[in-house]
Image (tube, rainbow, N blue to C red):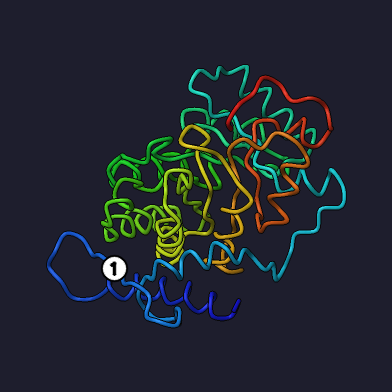
Amino acid sequence: MPQKLDELAAAIADRALARLRGEGSGNSASLPETDCAPGGCEPCPQIHSCGARALFEEGATRLTPTAIRTSKDLAQVIDHTMLKPDATREDIVKTCEEARRHGFATVCVNPSWVEVAARLLHGSSTVPIAVVAFPSGAATTSAKVFETREAIRKGAREIDMVANIGALKGKDYRTVFEDIAAVASAAHPLPVKVILEMGALSTEEKVIGCALAKAAGAAYVKTSTGFGAGGATAEDVALMRRVVGNDMGVKASGGIRTAADAKKMVEAGASRIGASASVAIVTGHAPGPPSRY
């Protein structure tokens, strides 16, 4: 069964890419949905509702699990996050100081703070991330490309972009694909994570969104902004890992507040954790006021 699920996920991605590269003068490319034939699903280049559900129910088989034995191991997979809209310079300084002290992988900030974060993190192992089209994802592709290039010019070394969620739900897959591909191209060779806002999607939409992100050249798929419907769940992380395989990273973000939360996500298949409660996660201290991010 796991092999069939892997083949189904690969077929969805291949079908998405083939259709988007194929002929056609329309403004969007829709992948056909079909009902299952009697006797159950077989892998095919179409999107079967029951196949997507089976993918969800099967969960993930980690081929290369991240070993988390110590708090230092955990720190090295955390994107320490400061994305609240009212963040001040003092908040950014504090976040970067914490990241250097605890050895977090990155600091994730809004684009206006990237230059400050890059300067504060210079000489450390922690790198700055900028979010793009955050948190709605509803900006035009050209605006996302500009924001990406500007953030990199200011010092960002990774980009977390929000996908066009409305286009995904509306089955406008060409728009979703081209949006991601344009940002991935603008950021190259730096990695792009695609935020899919999983809490707003059906199981089928989750599978298709991950497949499109993979086909478009993203480096990671990411569960949520933390500002939308729901946060990270182990079930969603497992599904994402199953769809993208080991070719991509999976980032769990949204509502991760404790070491137990973080380890659960890693066990489900996450290779990166996004959290604002990072210090509490690695020290075991009580986290601050509740935050979905």
The image quadrant where one finds the N terminus is: bottom right
Q: Residue 120: percent from the left, percent from the top? A: 65, 30
> Is 54 left, or right, of 32 in this rendering?
right
Q: Amino acid at mark 1?
A: Leu
Q: Residue 285 lies in what quarter of the image? A: top right
Q: Residue at x 75, y 59 (%)?
A: 66
Q: Between 250 and 206, which is closer to the camera in this rendering?
A: 206
Q: Residue at x 41, y 44 (%)?
A: 148
The 10 Å Cα crowd at callout 1, few under 14, some 14 to 19, many 20 or more, is some
Q: Residue at x 27, y 61 (%)?
A: 174
> Is 242 left, or right, of 149 in this rendering?
right
The image quadrant where one finds the C terminus is: top right
Q: Between 260 and 137, which is closer to the camera in this rendering?
A: 260
Q: Residue 283: percent from the left, percent from the top? A: 84, 33
Q: Name above or below for residue 255 compared with residue 291.
A: below
Q: Residue 259 lies in what quarter of the image? A: top right
Residue with the mark numbered 1: 31
Q: Residue 45: percent from the left, percent from the top? A: 37, 79
Q: Residue at x 52, y 28 (%)?
A: 113
Q: Secondary structure at mark 1?
A: loop
Q: Residue 201: percent from the left, percent from the top? A: 42, 49
> Is 184 left, or right, of 77 in this rendering?
left
